[in-house]
Image (cartoon, helix red, strand yellow):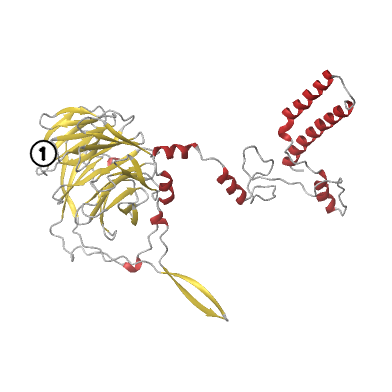
Amino acid sequence: MTEDVQKHSVHTLVFRSLKRTHDMFVSDHAKPVALDDHSHQVKMSSKLKADYGAVLHMPVLKEGKDRAIHGGLHGHQPSTESGDDPEYLVTGTHAYPSGPGVALTAETKIHRMPSEGGVHSMALALPPSQARLDASRTAASVGDIHRHAGIAERSQPPISSLVHMEGGGTKTSALVRKAPTMPRPQWHPPWKLFRVISGHLGWVRSIAVEPGNQWFVTGSADRTIKIWDLASGKLKLSLTGHISTVRGVAVSSRSPYLFSCGEDKQVKCWDLEYNKVIRHYHGHLSAVYGLDLHPTIDVLVTCSRDATARVWDIRTKANVHTLSGHTNTVATVKCQAAEPQIITGSHDSTIRLWDLVAGKTRATLTNHKKSVRAVVLHPRQYTFASGSADNIKQWTFPDGSFIQNLSGHNAIINTLAVNSDGVLVSGADNGTIHMWDWRTGYNFQRIHAAVQPGSLDSESGIFACMFDHSESRLITAEADKTIKVYREDDTATEESHPVNWKPEILKRKRF
């Protein structure tokens, strides 16, 4: 007898004993009794029903069934009591017993072990989890988001053709896959190192170029912000005020302001006419990892390790929205004038597109399997790219429809940059830089940045990269405490640096 049946036998014996006691009690008092005895009888009956009524619904185990099983093996016929049910029924999705509050469905079958259908039925019948209720409170369209997230990528049918073959009088069908052919990529001249700028005493974590293209700003783990002349690479100014690593910098094109954020939870607004902090934006509960300025309105968006992004009114310092929904660090945030106006990437492996007016999630992209640390918007197309340790993915706005994967940069990608010519740059934790053709995803150049003399090889890492406004220079912020400037090789031609394009060996890209 199994453990479940033994448990049920114990319950059955207890119930039968109580039932027998109750019947004896009733038979002994069947004759007329005094009022006090009758009241006592009613009380006892009520107590039995109240204390043991919960087990009245339980099915009675027919020991004869087990005897039938064992007896049948030896050729003996089981004996059953008259009026007994022929079989012992166990209902519900669990083997035994059916627990309180578990909704049973018409499709639930007789079984001793839970079936897949029964488990699925119970899952549908159970109330929604607290996490799902919390998610529905933070974003009005979370239900639609979960239903539609990643559909464009996952539902793409394989490129195939159905071939019918006849043989032996029967017709069979075979699925023949055709490998996709990449269109010929555009030729881009290779990039080469032009200048190395030293001056920071810690990892250089962030870069911003001012709208006039005369100077650029860097933030570092040495807690300083430095302003450099773009043409000569000379240091113009150092700003101190942060008490931890400066993780993000941005220069406004609408006012003479510089914005910075860091691991000290602070978001600062610097007046560049006086080189002083004029505003603080308080609200984040942990390190602030990135920021971006809206191109058309006076709004600043920051992202943090507290799993939120915050929208600030630059002038009033008011926290307009707290964008909640990510379940881990929000590592990057980007703004654009068109819808969706805010895009965030997180260590929870998702990308969220936000409705700025409502402060709610518009779409959630769940295709990445690793942390998303970098997002970049194409300057001319209505598309963007995201970088993760699994691969780089390209998407179209406004709903984040998947375009293609760019695979091959097998490292933790910290930063992405793209210019109008369709050159996409990815920088990784191991000090490698890959150059891609945006349209086809062809990797036309790979660079391993040389570390500064005296640095350790382990201090080889690219934390940020950015094209200047002329798009003729690429600036990188690196772990060896330097800033490197790259330029296109003017002497290169299509003959000297041909495109190594072999479509016949290309493999089908996986989602």
Corner quadrant of residue 222:
top left
Work out whether residue 133 or residue 173 is closer to the camera in this orientation and state it. 133
Q: Residue at x 17, y 35 (%)?
A: 258
Outermost residue on the top side: it is 36
Q: How many marks?
A: 1
Q: Is residue 385 among the parts visible in the rendering?
A: yes
Most foreground residue, 392 or 30: 30
Query: In the image shown, does 109 or 150 lie closer to the viewer?
Result: 109
Q: Residue at x 15, y 56 (%)?
A: 489
Residue drawn at x 51%, y 39% as measured from the top left: 129
**Above or below for 83 versus 291:** below
Q: Quadrant of residue 135?
A: top left
* Residue 461 visible: no
- In x, y percent, where is residue 274? 11, 29
Give the position of the N terminus as an image quadrant. Answer: top right
Quarter of the image for residue 280 reads: top left
Q: Amino acid at mark 1?
A: Lys
Does 79 appear above or below 264? below
Location of the C terminus (image quadrant):
bottom left
Residue of label 1: 234
Whether residue 145 sits left or right of residue 266 in the image: it is right
Asked whether, in this view, residue 334 is left or right of residue 89, the answer is: left
Instruction: Please give the name of the residue rendered at 17% of the width and 28% of the height, measured from the top-left corner.
Output: 277
Q: Position of residue 72 (x, y in %)?
A: 84, 53
x, y percent for residue 401: 34, 54
Measured from the top left, where is residue 386 in percent x and y?
31, 49
Q: Circle 1 — which element?
A: loop
Q: Residues within 10 Å of mark 1 (few under 14, many from 20)?
A: some
